[in-house]
Image (spheres, helix red, strand yellow):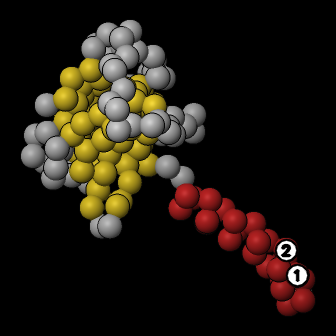
Amino acid sequence: MVRMRYLQFCLLAPFVAATAVHAQDRPIGFLTPSKNIACQFFSNDGQGVLRCDIINLEVRPRRPADCELDYGHAFEMSAKGAAGRICAGDTVMDASLSVLAYGEVWQRGGFTCRSEQSGLTCFNAMQRGFSLARGRQEVF
């Protein structure tokens, strides 16, 4: 009986470990119901950072001369700093993120985001942030 339990443990241990590691690697964030905007929360040197990407824009702003990557789709802010568009060659779009329904609020690490049919608004503890929609993006 003891031998059987040990064998079961040996066979299941790798799966339990893999599940625990996978759960820790799961992104923290959300998608809007339209799936046009995705946001993810990160910890950078102990400070929270929120990044949101919008996929479809009616007008894409001109890329700055010092940006060699994509520009216009990615927005980022720290928990206590300014918000802005960033130069980025990647995306935080991830189909595994949960959907933040219209009218709902998401909060994490000093950030608050509200999903509305008209778009998404996110801000930090300093009331700095951005409003994102297909037709208009505003940093405040």
> Could you tell me how far apart the alpha carbons at marks 2 and 1 are, in whole angstroms?
6 Å
Q: Can residue 39 be seen in this view?
A: no
Image point 32% across, 30% down: which residue? 64
Mark seen at residue 7:
1
Most foreground residue, 9 or 98: 98
Residue 65 in the image: state x and y as whole percent.
Answer: 34, 32
Callout 1 crowding tier (Cα within 10 Å): few <14, some 14–19, many ≥20 = few
Mark seen at residue 103:
none
- Number of marks present in the image shown: 2
Specify the farthest residue to the bottom: 2
Residue picked out by circle 2: 11
The reply to whether dot 2 and dot 1 touch (C-beta < 8 Å) is yes
Image point 61% across, 66% down: which residue? 20
Image point 36% across, 26% down: which residue? 63
Residue 42 in the image: state x and y as whole percent.
Answer: 38, 54
Q: Is residue 10 above or below residue 48?
A: below
Specify the farthest residue to the front: 65
Is 132 on the left or on the right of 55, as rendered? left
At mark 2, the secondary structure is helix
Is 43 on the left or on the right of 109, as rendered? right
Q: Is residue 57 above or below residue 96?
A: above
Residue 31 in the image: state x and y as whole percent.
Answer: 44, 31
